[in-house]
Image: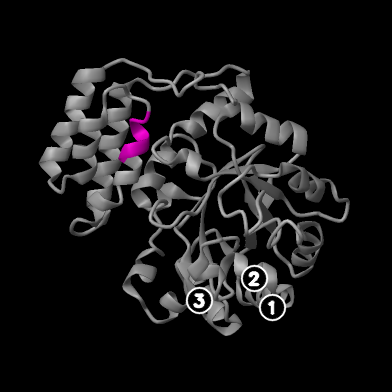
Amino acid sequence: MRIGKLDLGEKPIFLAPMEDITDPSFRYLCKKFGADMMYTEFISSDGLIRDGAKSVKKLDIFDYERPMGIQLYGHIVESMVEATHRAVAAEPDIIDINYGCPVRKIANRGAGAGMLANIPLMLEMTRAIVRASSLPVTVKTRLGWDDQQKIIKEVAEQLQDQGIAALTIHGRTRAQMYKGTADWTLIGEVKQNPRMKIPIIGNGDITNPVEAKEAFDTYGVDGIMIGRAAVGKPWLFKQIKHYLKTGELQPEPTVSEKVDMARMQFEKSLEFKEGPVGIYEMRRHFSNYFKGLPHFKELRIKLLTSLEVDEILSLLEQIRELYGNERPEVSGGFWDRS
C-alpha cells in the first residue's frame, strides 16, 4: 500500500490519532510492537495558529516513530490552511484531516464529524489543504451524520476528486459516537467502487487478530486502523501481524511482561511531560494494562489515584509479585468474539 510516495508494505496497521492518548510515550510502545503508521494526537487549527502551547507541543515527532502523520481539525478554511503550513514545517510524512471526531464540542461547531453536515465546505476545505500542502493529504471520516444520511460512498468519490492520497473510514455515523457496532459493509462498498483509486483504510471495532484478518479478507481494505483497542495493549499490533502471517494466535503477555511495558510507558510519559500530567494521562493506560486481574480493586484504586512516582513504581512491582506469570483472559476467552 502506498500513500503518495510512502510505501507502507502489504496490509499495514495504523494507530489511530486519539486525544490525550497517542502521545510520544504511547507511540513509543506501539512502534516497538510493529505499528506501521502512527499519528500525533489531533491538533486544533485555531490552537496551532495562535501558538497555543499544547497544540504546538503536539507537533513533536521523533525519527524512530516514522512514518508519522499530523492530524488537524477545524471549521474555518483559512485557519486550516495556515495550520497546514505550520504542520508541514514540522516535517511529518503526511497531513491528515479530521472529519470524524464526534465529540459534541467539536462537531457542533462544524469541525471533525460536524463537516458531514456541510459537504460543500468539507470539499472546499479539503481542496484548499491539498493545494497548500507539499506532503500527501489524507482524510479520516465516518459513514455520515446519522442512519438517514450514510453518504460515505458519494463523499469518498468527492474527496478523492479533491486530490487526497488515502481515506480512512470509521464504520459508525456521528450520531452513534462510539456506541453500537461498526458497519464494515459500507467500508467494503467504498473499497469495491471501481472509481476509487486511492487506498481505503478501515477503522472500528477491530480488537483482536481474528477481526483484523476478517477486515482484510472480507472487505478488501488496503489497511486497518486500531484505536481504543490498543490502549493499554500496545502488543496488539504484533499479535495481529503474527496472525496475518502464520494463522497462529499468540498468547497474551504475562502480567510480569505487562508490568515491564507499563513501566516503560510510564517512564516515557514522565520524560515527555512536565508536572503531574505524565501521571494523569497514564491512568487510562494503567487501567487497561491490568484489566481482568482477579481481586485487583484495591490495587487498581491506588494505582489510579497516586500522584507519587515512587509509589506508582512500587505498586507496579507489587502487581508483578502478586500475579507474576498469570495470563488473565476476558470473559469467554481472549479470542472469543461473543
Residue 180 percent across, percent down from the top left: 61, 44
Which element is circle 2 on?
helix
| 288, above or below 131, in the image | above
Q: Residue at x 62, y 59 (%)?
A: 174
Which amino acid, mark 1? Answer: Leu
Q: Mark 2 or 3, which is nearer the eye?
A: 2
Q: Which mark is residue 83?
A: 3
The percent coordinates of residue 95 (x first, y second) are: 57, 64
**Main secondary structure of the magenta stretch:** helix
Quadrant of the image occupied by residue 146: bottom right
Sequence-earlier tag: 2 or 3? 3
What residue type is disc 2 on?
Met
Instruction: Please tell me which residue lies in front, 313 or 51.
Output: 313
326 lies above or below 313: above
x 76%, y 38%: residue: 219
Tell me if residue 289 is in the magenta stretch.
yes
Tell me the residue at 48%/70% (across/down): 105
The first of marks 1 and 2 along the sequence is 2
- State the residue in front, 61 or 260: 260
Spatial distance from mark 1 to mark 2, Cα to Cα?
A: 7 Å
Q: Which residue is mark 2?
A: 115
Callout 3: few (<14), some (14-19), or many (20+) C-alpha neighbours within 10 Å? Answer: many
Q: Which mark is residue 121?
A: 1
Quadrant for the N terminus in the image: top right
Closer to us: 240 or 197? 240
Pointer 1 and pointer 2: residues touching (CB < 8 Å)?
yes
For this view, does 249 lie left or right of residue 2?
left
Where residue 327 sits, quadrant-wise, is top left
Q: Which residues are magenta?
A: 286-291
Q: On the picture, is 73 further left or further right than 164? A: left
Magenta stretch: includes residue 277: no
Report helix, strand or loop for mark 1.
helix
